[in-house]
Image (spheres, rainbow, N blue to C red):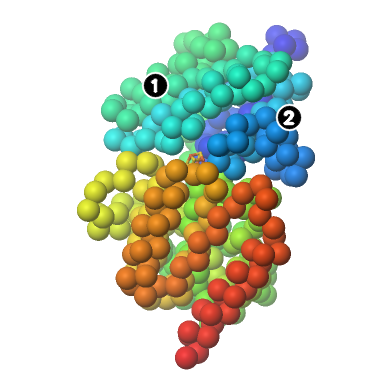
């Protein structure tokens, strides 16, 4: 610890892509120096693959790499034990056990702050307990914690609003038609034409937004003339409403989001097809991917499943993507 200030490492992987701004602001407001690992690159991925158990999915392996990169640079790692981030819904068990798996793999292993986040039964109480636990790990209590939480929530909501603003309507889309929202940050000026094909790209945020891991699939689709619609571009209401078609509740938070987005997008006439990006070794994806594909087949909506692992070659993936986009254009002009 330098000048009585914690240097706290936050791996840029997994749920960092959902809650990073919240965590960073909270710890900074408590006086810690937050060190976020750099964007994923081959060295970080290889490091993670060398440390993780072979059965782990690709995003978890990459998380190991980010954590290991941080080890010599920080006093402690923040690796929350995510059980549930919303009522009656759960996060994948691999994330519940992540702090323990890292302790077994990292040698030497620094202090790991592994606050449990469980909002499954009583979300408000669960969140309050998690906030107290995170601050308590740094030895801080009282009103400073409340102020830090307020700052974190403000930044988080501003970040969400900005994301939504960036992804808002382009030609032919309006705020009343959130299904048509396009993830604009992947597009370059002049690339979109009025009759570009709308393509849904669904999958875990930590695959899609990690440009190395996810091989920039949304960017590739846009360079092939498509307009990308992501799960994050839909409202929670649209996703939940679409999920009601399922005979049973999907109780994995991300699985439900992906399935709801898939079902919603399948119903949109102006969406030409769907691409589902999955990770090799992902249990929930093996179920959700198959289910989404069956529904797409029944509804006649073209569906491309792309499964990524550490050996996936970009050239093969590009070929499949180009063939899919080509088929969508042919269908439209048939
Ligand atoms: S949901 Fe799938 S990709 Fe995500 S951590 Fe779990 S197994 Fe890995």
Kindly identify which residue carries mark 2.
Answer: 69
Q: Looking at the image, which residue sits at the far left? A: 247
The percent position of residue 256, horizontal first and vertical second, equals 36, 48
Q: Quadrant of residue 67?
A: top right
Q: Residues within 10 Å of mark 2 (few under 14, many from 20)?
A: many
In the image, what residue occupies the spot 70% across and 33% down?
Answer: 50
Picture quarter with the N terminus:
top right
Residue 12 makes an appearance in the image: no
Q: Residue furthest front?
A: 54
State the residue at coordinates (40%, 47%): 255
Circle 1/circle 2 CB separation < 8 Å: no
Q: Quadrant of residue 307?
A: bottom right
Q: Earlier in the sequence, mark 1 or mark 2?
A: 2
Badge 1 element: helix
**Position in image of residue 185 (x %, y %):** 62, 59
Give residue 71's position: percent from left, percent from top. 72, 22
Q: Label 1, label 2: how many angstroms apart (C-alpha)?
A: 31 Å
Residue drawn at the location 40% of the way across and 63% of the way down = 293
> Residue 68 or 113: which is nearer the viewer?
68
Number of the front mark, 1 or 2: 2
Residue that badge 1 annotates: 128
List the single residue furthest toward the bottom. Answer: 334
Count every numbered label the image shows and give the total: 2
């Amino acid at each position: 610890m330098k000048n009585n200030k914690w240097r706290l490492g936050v791996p840029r992987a997994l749920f960092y892509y959902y809650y990073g701004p919240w965590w960073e602001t909270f710890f900074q407001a408590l006086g810690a120096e937050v060190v976020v690992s750099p964007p994923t690159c081959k060295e970080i991925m290889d490091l993670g693959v060398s440390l993780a158990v072979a059965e782990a999915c690709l995003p978890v392996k990459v998380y190991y790499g980010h954590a290991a990169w941080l080890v010599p640079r920080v006093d402690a790692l923040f690796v929350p034990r995510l059980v549930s981030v919303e009522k009656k819904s759960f996060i994948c068990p691999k994330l519940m056990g992540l702090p323990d798996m890292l302790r077994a793999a990292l040698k030497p292993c620094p202090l790991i702050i592994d606050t449990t986040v469980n909002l499954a039964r009583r979300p408000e109480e669960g969140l309050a307990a998690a906030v107290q636990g995170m601050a308590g790990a740094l030895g801080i209590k009282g009103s400073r914690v409340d102020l830090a939480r307020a700052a974190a929530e403000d930044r988080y909501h501003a970040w969400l609003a900005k994301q939504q603003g960036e992804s808002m309507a382009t030609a032919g889309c309006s705020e009343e038609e959130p299904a048509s929202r396009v993830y604009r940050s992947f597009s370059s000026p002049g690339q979109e034409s009025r009759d570009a094909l709308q393509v849904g790209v669904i999958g875990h945020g930590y695959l899609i937004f990690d440009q190395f891991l996810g091989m920039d699939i949304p960017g590739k689709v846009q360079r092939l003339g498509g307009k990308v619609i992501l799960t994050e571009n839909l409202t929670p209401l649209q996703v939940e409403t679409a999920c009601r078609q399922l005979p049973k509740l999907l109780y994995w938070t991300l699985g439900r989001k992906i399935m709801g987005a898939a079902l919603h997008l399948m119903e949109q006439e102006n969406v030409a097809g769907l691409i589902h990006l999955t990770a090799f070794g992902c249990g929930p994806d093996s179920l959700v991917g198959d289910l989404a594909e069956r529904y797409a087949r029944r509804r006649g909506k073209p569906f491309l499943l792309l499964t990524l692992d550490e050996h996936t070659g970009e050239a093969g993936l590009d070929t499949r993507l180009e063939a899919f986009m080509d088929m969508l254009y042919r269908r439209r002009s048939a």
